[in-house]
Amino acid sequence: MKKILSWLITFSLIALLIICYINREGVVKFVMGNIAQYQTVNEPKSNGYHTNYDFEFVQTTNDFHVKNKQDILNVIYTVLNSGETKFTFYCDVSYKNCSNDLANISKDQELLSVINNMVSPYNSYEKLYITTNTYGKTDIEITKLYSEEDINKINSKIEEIKKEIINDNMSDKDKIKAFHDYIINHSVYDEQRALNIEKGSTADYQYNSHKANGPLLEGHALCSGYSDAMKLFLDQLNIPNYKIANNDHIWNLLYIDSTWLHLDLTWDDPVTSDKSNLLLHKFFLITTDELLKQDTSSHNFKQNYYPEAK
């Protein structure tokens, strides 16, 4: 009887080893997947430009074992918002479609740009890489749009402007209007760069008009430069805000007096035939209905990305 029992145990072990060998890839994936399941992930360390805003589209998370697509988007937002340049998170073993969703998200530049527009310009990316392995380990690597030199110069300029035009007796709306007016009065739309972009030209550009450097330091801006400069100022006021974008344009949306309102410095600084520098307030703190009554071609947007702009 003992010999039979010993033989059965030996046979079972041999059979198990044969099965494991035949299905060795699946066994390894199962083991590695379960290791990933219990891998501890420290929260990203936030820098001084982290904002405390959560939006309907993405929210801050402290769970870095993702279980669905929304979890992935929340992790990307959390990492970008923190200012980290490298971060690792994991797919939960229950999330069977994780690799496919990660691959699709990493290729969706419009989707990633939406999230990028919801963090401080200083934490926004110029390049973003997402790589994952078959065991659910996912790495994010970020190349920032703004250098430390950029940040120091821009911060110094904003403080200089604030001392000149802002005082403690002003309401938030007054402060926003003063900054809006200052930017428009001290900068012009960079027509040459806009024309080069439209033509697909790779010519060197004279101004950093696509960033806040342009309107704040160089007197020339594209819509992305105007909106970055305004977002930096709104963040300093601790006003919830983000940038809305479509294929052709970008502007600001902010929450003030219990209402989400649009703010577009580009269209309040129109290009004129005689090169005069006009200052308008047609696109200053207006509702979505008011915005679309004035223009629908350049200010259309996907509401599923920006549900606050109802």
Image (spheres, grey):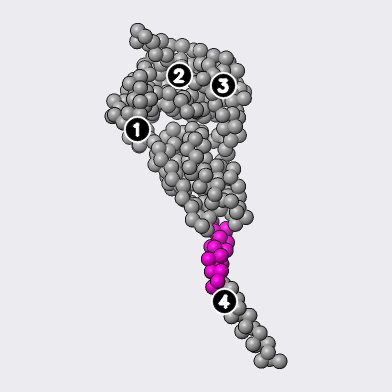
C-alpha gap between disc 2 and disc 3 = 13 Å
Which residue matches tag 4? 17
Query: Alpha-carbon neighbours of circle 1 within 10 Å: few (<14), some, or many (≥20)?
Result: some
Q: Is residue 267 above or below residue 122?
A: above
User: What numbered label is drawn on residue 261?
Assistant: 3
Query: With 254 as the anchor, is 210 left or right in this view?
Result: left
Which residue matches tag 1? 150
Question: Is residue 34 one of those drawn in magenta?
Answer: yes
Circles 2 and 3, Cβ within 8 Å, touching? The answer is: no
- Residue 248: x %, y % from top left: 46, 25
Query: Alpha-carbon neighbours of circle 3 within 10 Å: few (<14), some, or many (≥20)?
Result: many
Highlighted magenta segment, given as a residue range: 21-41
- Residue 96: x %, y % from top left: 60, 54
C-alpha gap between disc 4 and disc 2 = 69 Å
User: What numbered label is drawn on residue 265?
Assistant: 2
Which numbered disc, 4 or 2, marks the residue closer to the eye? Answer: 4
